[in-house]
Amino acid sequence: MPPAPSSPAAQPLPGDGDADGSGDPISESEALARLRQSDDQSHQYYAAWWLGRNRSRHPEAVPLLLAALRQRRPRDPLAGVEENAVARNAARALGKLGDSGAIAELLAALDDEDDGLREAAARSLGELGATEAVALLQRRLASGPAGAGATRPDSPRLQEPCEAMLEALGAIGVAGSDVIAVIEPFTGHERPLIRSAACRALLQLSGEPRWADPLVQLLDHPQLQVRRAALMDLGAVGWRPALEPICRTLAENSLKLIALRGLVEQGEHHGATIPTEAVLSAMDSLL
Amino acid sequence: MSVEMSTISEHIRAVQQAGSSQAMLTATSALASCDHGESANGEAIACLVEVLGFNNPGAAVAAVDGLIRLGPVAVQPILDSLDPRNYGARAWAVRALAGIGDVRGLELLEEALASDVGPSVRRAAACGLGSLQLQALAPQQHAAVRQRALAALLAGCRDGEWVVRYAVSVGLESLGLRLAPQPQEHEQLLAALAALGQPELEDTMVVRLRARLAHQRLLPMAPTEAQAEAQP
């Protein structure tokens, strides 16, 4: 871990931030102790994040995170940091610890009424490659862009956390025609981030180049947030034919480097046309 | 006043009067890319250095590029401008100094790689430490600079961020190819890169691949005894 900033006014550069890392450096045993107590939920919140961020291998980490995931309750928007915030961080951490023993509880969280928790659970099930989650993810997305993908009347959020769910289906990698059929309609969603997630999943599942074209086009989108998402998505798929467009994209080098890392690590099957050394050389020039 | 000088003055005025972050970016890019010719324009350098402190990342990137183009003449103004209270400006200054490769920036690059909070700053420092320009120095000073750069990079192999360890691999390769290491230093370089290439010691695949590539490129470059004796 890099040392903490010397000045409290320190301003991280774009792409450098640990969004949740605003806390003092603590030890693993301190993190476990903070998660075990339940008087101070902001301590639990930070501890859950810490255990995931540091890929804790302590035997108590997964049981404590599962307990934190279970302590959720119906959402109370008036409360400050409530149990559900702790549960969401616990769900995120469980995805990073790679223990398949967490899958059953994460599946239950995928049906929770808190869409933020469903989002965290979907991402973690994707990270764990949980094939058990495919049927449930399909079911929650089956109503398509007009149902699951519709904007809520009371907030800018969608009915379902579609981006996370689509990405999870791509990461899990079950490429049945029924799965493809559920994902495909989202390539026409009105929001570019959802289209990007759908194309990413289809490219991962089918390997068909036609799903790469819309992603490459999104690298030119006027909004930085969309260009960043397309960079991450092409990186996650390891789509080496996008090497040149990625290097030209108007975005931080930090993000382009993450995308190119994906091209190296996930894109070995393109090695005959675009050798690993070419991608490494492009990375060198972005440092 | 020559045509070039008046153009530069206009660009400087445009930066000073920019009313939006987009206008600032456009004006800075224009100033950074104009041909400064023989006359090292102190006002242009001062203006680009000032932009580093404006909390405008797009303009700062353009200013860094411009300062790197200007080269060694920009080093002292950058060092003089360092403000410990403005982290952002300092981070961009590190990037500019890393790109210029002037040995006057050595201490700042060492410090940045060892303890800057931003991975993008540490990664730029690592690259800069491997590509310092020694030509301007007396030959007897080369060894001291090389040793310090090598020590900083070897410590950087333990950085917590993969992208910094990646940059350290690139820095070690460049130091090995360009700064004429002694046989013992060459061994240290190869050992550090071999460690970064091992899955038991390095968990990020792309870092392992880059370190192995650097190792492979440096292996045939082992200095002979004769070369070693010819050096101070």
Image: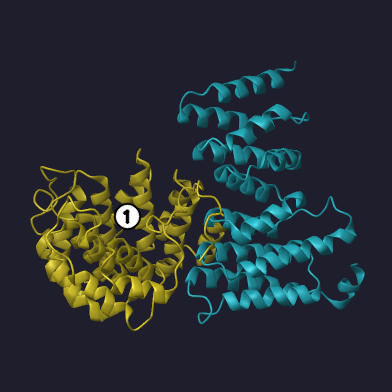
Chain colours: A yellow, B cyan
Task: Give coordinates of residue A18: x percent, y percent.
Answer: 42, 57
Q: Most extreme residue toward the bottom, as rendered?
A: A59
Q: Is residue A82 above or below residue B84?
A: below
Pick whichever, B152 or A178, lies toward us.
B152
Task: Give coordinates of residue A133: x percent, y percent.
Answer: 17, 71
Q: In the rendered structure, which amino acid carries the disc numbered 1?
A: Ala
Mark 1 sits on what residue?
Answer: A212
One can see residue A173 in this view: no
Is disc 1 placed on a helix, strand or loop? helix
Q: Quadrant of residue A107?
A: bottom left
Q: Is residue B90 above or below residue A170?
A: above
Q: Residue at x 62, y 62 (%)?
A: B114
Q: Is residue B59 above or below residue B147?
A: above
Q: Most extreme residue toward the top, as rendered?
A: B1
Q: Residue at x 16, y 44 (%)?
A: A155
Residue A100 in the figure: left or right of residue A220: left
Task: Give coordinates of residue A131: x percent, y percent.
Answer: 20, 75
- Crowd rating for badge 1 (residues with CA inside 10 Å; few <14, some 14–19, many 20+): many
Pick whichever, A53 or A213, lies toward us.
A53
Q: Quadrant of residue A236?
A: bottom left
Task: Give coordinates of residue B131: x percent, y percent.
Answer: 70, 56
Residue A199 in the figure: left or right of residue B223: left
Badge 1 sits on which subunit? Answer: A
Q: Residue at x 75, y 63 (%)?
A: B148
Pick whichever, B79 or A230, lies toward us.
B79
One can see residue B120 in this view: yes
Q: Count all numbered tags in the image, as a single digit.
A: 1
Q: Is residue B68 above or below residue A136?
A: above
Residue A4 in the figure: left or right of residue A219: right
Residue A71 in the figure: left or right of residue B152: left
Q: Quadrant of residue B41?
A: top right
Q: Residue at x 66, y 49 (%)?
A: B99
